[in-house]
Image (tube, helix red, strand yellow):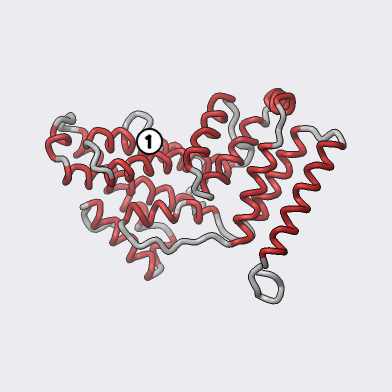
Amino acid sequence: MDRSGRAPSDRSRASLFARVWLLMGALVLGGCVGTDFVEMAQDSLRRAFRFETPSSFFQPVLERARGDREVSHMHARARQHYLQIIASIERLTPEMREELRRDGLLGEAYALRALAQWRLGRLDDARASIKIVRDSNQEPLRARDRALFEGMAGVLKLEEALAANAAGRPFNEVYTAAAGDHGGWRTLATARTKTTPEDRLQSDLMQARLGCYAAIVAAQRRDPRGAAALDPEVLPRLRAEAQVELNQLARTPEAALVSFSAIIRRWQVVCELDAPVR
């Protein structure tokens, strides 16, 4: 929205992108270094968060995992800033990437690109960017971005589990994506350690973990013989852990809201868990 409350016109959006590309061109011609493009991407993410919170990254997949109608949407201005992040990082030359690697900023650069790709729904592109970050052995600089990045890696595994269920794939494929050694359940647990207990992201990460368990429950109903092939101790243990997650979710500050209480109840139902102990 502009100051008058009206959505930006196609002409104004085109003008904004034209200015961004002119600025990038000027930076390149003026001897821009890789850190300049990373700083531009960092600034674009800060600007995007003026229009939506990091929780917005999780809402689409959480709605699908709960079996709810998707109602999440993206602010047009936020979308522009995510596109600018991708454009900034894609301007990096091989020399600039090597410079960033030496300075410990290569992981930051491609984590920012991965986050933007994730929010825009470009999941395969986000996976490719995650691989670059992992191979660099360099994490995002800010704690919130580290938690968001790790959360993204877990959510992409949840996406795989949901897609496998939708396609009627065997139980083992769903389980591997949702709770295998490199699955969403464990990756999202790691993400929780990268932010403070008071951070709003904790609630999103808990819900994403419950989404992983809900995918396993759905796969077990659909393919009981496949589930029976698993070690008999695994699923009861996982259910107990999911119950703890639901209990913790019910103790978050958001649980006091009537609307959030309905979400907690929904997770209880789709995960086939007991009512949470608050």
Q: Is residue 130 left or right of residue 16?
A: left
Q: Nearer the viewer, residue 203 or 247?
A: 203
Residue 56 showing in the rendered view: yes
Amino acid type for the residue under numbered disc 1: Arg
Q: Which of 163 and 49 is in front in this view?
A: 163
Above/below status of 154 relative to 267:
above
Q: Which residue is at 69% across, 41% downward?
A: 88
Q: In this view, does 188 lie to the left or right of 172?
A: right
Q: In this view, does 139 lie to the left or right of 225?
A: right
Q: Which residue is at 23% across, 37% downward?
A: 237
Residue 198 showing in the rendered view: no
Crowd band around label 1 with a 10 angstrom C-alpha radius: few (<14), some (14–19), many (20+): some
* Quadrant where the image shows the C terminus: bottom left
Image quadrant in which you'd find residue 136: top right
* Quadrant where the image shows the N terminus: bottom right
Please provide percent x and percent y for residue 141. 64, 37
Disc 1 target residue = 186
Q: Which of 20 and 210 is in front in this view?
A: 20
Please provide percent x and percent y for residue 260. 38, 64
Q: Is residue 251 left or right of residue 13?
A: left
Please provide percent x and percent y for residue 236. 19, 39
Helix, strand or loop for disc 1: helix
Q: Which residue is at 40% across, 66% downward?
A: 256
Please provide percent x and percent y for residue 268. 26, 56
Q: Which residue is at 70% across, 25% downward?
A: 94
Image quadrant in which you'd find residue 38: top right
> Which residue of the protein is positioned furthest toward the bottom in this rendering?
4
Above/below status of 268 relative to 209:
below
